[in-house]
Amino acid sequence: MNTKQAAIVSFLSRAARGEAEMSPHILNEFAENCKQALNKQFNEKRTDFRLRMSNVGKPLCQLQMQASGAKEEMPSYDFKMRMAMGDVLEALMIAVIQASGIEIKNKHGKVKLPINKKSSIEGEFDIELDDGIYDIKTASPFAFENKFKPDDAYERIKESDAFGYVTQGHGYGMASDKAFKGWIALNKSTGEIAIAEAKDTQQEREDVYDKIQHTYKSISKRKAFRRCFTDVEEVFYKKPTGNRTLGIECSYCPYKTTCWENLEFKRQLPSKGRNPKWIWYTHITEEWRNHDDSV
């Protein structure tokens, strides 16, 4: 646990015992941030597609779909609630950081990362502390425990980064000429907090900048669409079933039903449990299809 996380935990522990409180200034700022969050989610209109720091790290094939105006899955009713909750919890996290005695040098700083002489990628980072830029993330219990909390969090996030967190973070750092220090993550189910430290080396920055430039050129020149990922073999209790399913990166994509023909969303076919999890299947063998029809 680093010193910043220790300060946050100390404040919350004292608050739980009734020994610490938030100042009126912090409370008023939190209220204003919540107001802005709800206005953003419920009142602001969606704009036309453009590359921004918040999306430039996403898979290129997803961005190509979005830029082309491809049909996007209709979000479920809870989508807006999840987005609003994320913004409100970010505001809460900022209030807690301030109340913990940690100086926030800059909040929601607007930045531009030059791509060439005429173009740049714009964005807005969450907070700047004394040592650099931090991004605040709210996480599911699974993501929190398996990505943000472990000692090797940076490697885990980088290994499977369908949301482009690594590119986003280093992009903010390069654009502001500050170090990108990592993510302050909040488990939105338990309230637990972790700080996942980033590797801010010259090589990491160069790799990210090369990726951003490649994405920019591919989108601006409308290069031919190619899937970034393949489907994967379904394995159940270490035994292949012969079926194929979407990989985790594709499962989050709002264009998966456009990208993958004959995609089927079914309860996990080999499972005999009472409530099997739902799986996106790209191919179902005749044997399992017959088994499904007979159930």
Image: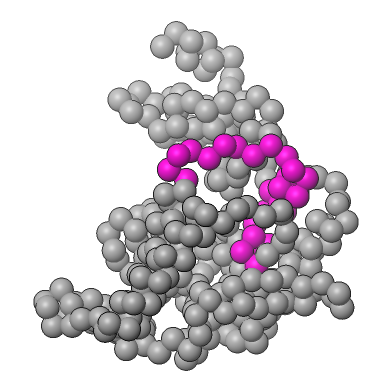
x and y percentages locating residue 224 in the rendered image = 85, 46
- Asked if one can make out residue 85 in the rendered structure from this viewpoint, the answer is yes
User: Which residue is found at the position 84% from the left and 62% from the top?
Assistant: 217
The stretch drawn in magenta includes residue 83? no
User: Which residue is found at the position 46% from the left and 66% from the top?
Assistant: 36
Nearest the viewer among 26 and 15 is 26
Nearest the viewer among 102 and 210 is 102
Viewed as shown, does residue 242 lie left or right of 98? Answer: right
Nearest the viewer among 39 and 278 is 39
Q: How is the image coloured?
A: one colour
| Quadrant housing the C terminus | top left
| Quadrant housing the N terminus | bottom left
- Asked if one can make out residue 243 in the rendered structure from this viewpoint, the answer is no
How many marks the image carries: the answer is 0
Q: Residue furthest top?
A: 294
x and y percentages locating residue 139 in the rendered image = 41, 59
User: Which residue is found at the position 30% from the left and 55% from the top?
Assistant: 189
Viewed as shown, does residue 254 lie left or right of 40? Answer: right
Bounds of the magenta segment:
53-79
Viewed as shown, does residue 206 lie left or right of 88? Answer: right
Q: Quadrant of residue 213?
A: bottom right
